[in-house]
Image: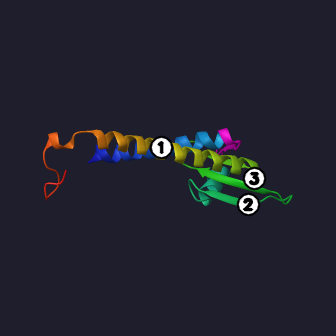
Amino acid sequence: MVVIAGLGLAGCADAVQQKDDMLAAAGFRIKPADTPERLALLKKLPPHKFTMRTTPNGSVSFLYADPTVCKCLYYGDETAYATYRQMALAQQLADKRLMAAQMEQDAAWNWHAWGPWGPYGWY
């Protein structure tokens, strides 16, 4: 049971790391929470979610708090946010294409050779 929980956490950390990599590639900049004050401010933001803030000069900034993987704050402008959204959508489409290809392979596999499945002998 502990091994399963550990694998689940590792998978979650991998997903967060992948998102962190995409944020950096989209143009978000990184500020480490390397002081007690920054760490306290980081913890006030929702973890692993975007927050929109208006800066003192009136421009819009997007913040993304990562308290688990890098213990840092990603910040970017509207261009970085739009770029990230495009990258995330492209990744979702690629994941769906991969899943569709895997399902096609599964459909061609001979399930009957393994005997009946389920409570009613479904194949």
Q: Please name which of the two marks, 1 or 3, marks the residue nearer to the observer.
A: 1
Using a 10 Å C-alpha cutoff, classify the residue at mark 1 as few (fewer than 14 neighbours), some (14 to 19) or many (20 or more). Answer: few
Q: Position of residue 79 (x, y in %)?
A: 75, 49
Left or right: residue 117 versus residue 46 is left
How far is the residue under mark 2 from the one under mark 3? Answer: 11 Å
When the figure is inspected, residue 41 is found, relative to residue 32, above or below; the finding is below
Q: Nearer the viewer, residue 77 or 94?
A: 94
Q: Is residue 63 above or below residue 102?
A: below
Q: Is residue 36 visible?
A: no
- Please rate how many residues cluster around mark 2, counting C-alpha atoms within 10 Å: few if below 14, some from 14 to 19, many from 20: some
- What's the CA distance linking mark 1 and mark 3? 29 Å
In this rendering, the label closer to the viewer, 2 or 3:
3
According to the image, label 2 marks what residue?
A: 53
Can residue 95 be seen here? The reply is yes
Q: Residue at x 68, y 53 (%)?
A: 63
Describe residue 104's horizontal placement relative to residue 64 as left or right: left
In primary-sequence order, the first of circles 1 and 3 is 3
Q: Image check: 74 left or right of 60? A: left
Q: Quadrant of residue 43?
A: bottom right
Q: Position of residue 64 (x, y in %)?
A: 63, 52
Which residue is label 3 attached to?
A: 78
Instruction: Say few, some or many: other residues with alpha carbon within 10 Å of mark 3 (under 14 / 14 to 19 / 20 or more).
Output: few
The spot of residue 7 in percent (x, y) is 36, 43
Secondary structure category for the residue under label 3: helix
